[in-house]
Image (tube, rainbow, N blue to C red):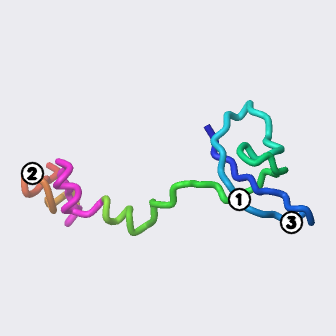
Amino acid sequence: MPLYVYEVVLADGTGGERFEVLQKLADAVLTAHPETGEPVRRVFAEANTPRAWTDAHGKAAMSDSNLAAKGFTKYVKTDNGTYERTTGTGPKKIQRK
């Protein structure tokens, strides 16, 4: 269910106290404060979206120590057809025949 922000409408038409209400999408918009009965209006607010993923987080997730902790093995290409293990378990080198 979405969390909506409402504000009390003061006598001069300006906004007063703000509060949040958890409502279903099908519920009607509030016109009165649920506790005091004062007139209210819904306020458009910034969406609460996760902002945790950045390039730095991506690099940390793909670090050698993190990959090894998760049980992965990482190989890096060193020569034409040769790959060397940088982290994890497995053969030190993989070569094409």
Q: Nearer the viewer, mark 1 or mark 2?
A: 1
Spatial separation of the CA atoms under disc 3 and disc 1: 12 Å
Say whether residue 72 is magenta.
yes
Q: Which residues are magenta?
A: 62-79
User: Three-letter amino acid code at disc 3?
Assistant: Thr
- Name the residue tied to disc 3: 14
Say whether residue 81 is magenta.
no
Q: Nearer the viewer, mark 2 or mark 3?
A: 3
Where disc 2 sits, the SS reads: loop
Residue at (18, 58) in percent of width and height: 83
Q: Earlier in the sequence, mark 1 or mark 2?
A: 1
Q: Position of residue 89 (x, y in %)?
A: 9, 51
Mark 3 is surrounded, within 10 Å at the Cα level, by few (under 14), some (14 to 19) or many (20 or more) other residues, namely few
Q: Position of residue 60 (x, y in %)?
A: 31, 64
Tell me where residue 17 sits by quadrant.
Answer: bottom right
- Residue lying farthest right? 12
- Name the residue tied to disc 2: 89
Q: Position of residue 12 (x, y in %)?
A: 92, 66
- Residue lying farthest bottom? 56
Q: Are marks 2 and 3 in contact (CB under 8 Å)?
A: no
Q: Left or right: 20 with respect to 65? A: right
Q: Position of residue 26 (x, y in %)?
A: 74, 30
Where disc 3 sits, the SS reads: loop
User: Three-letter amino acid code at disc 2?
Assistant: Thr
Residue at (75, 48) in percent of width and height: 36
Tell me where residue 23 sits by quadrant.
Answer: top right
Vertical comparison of 67 with 28: above or below: below
- Name the residue tied to disc 1: 18
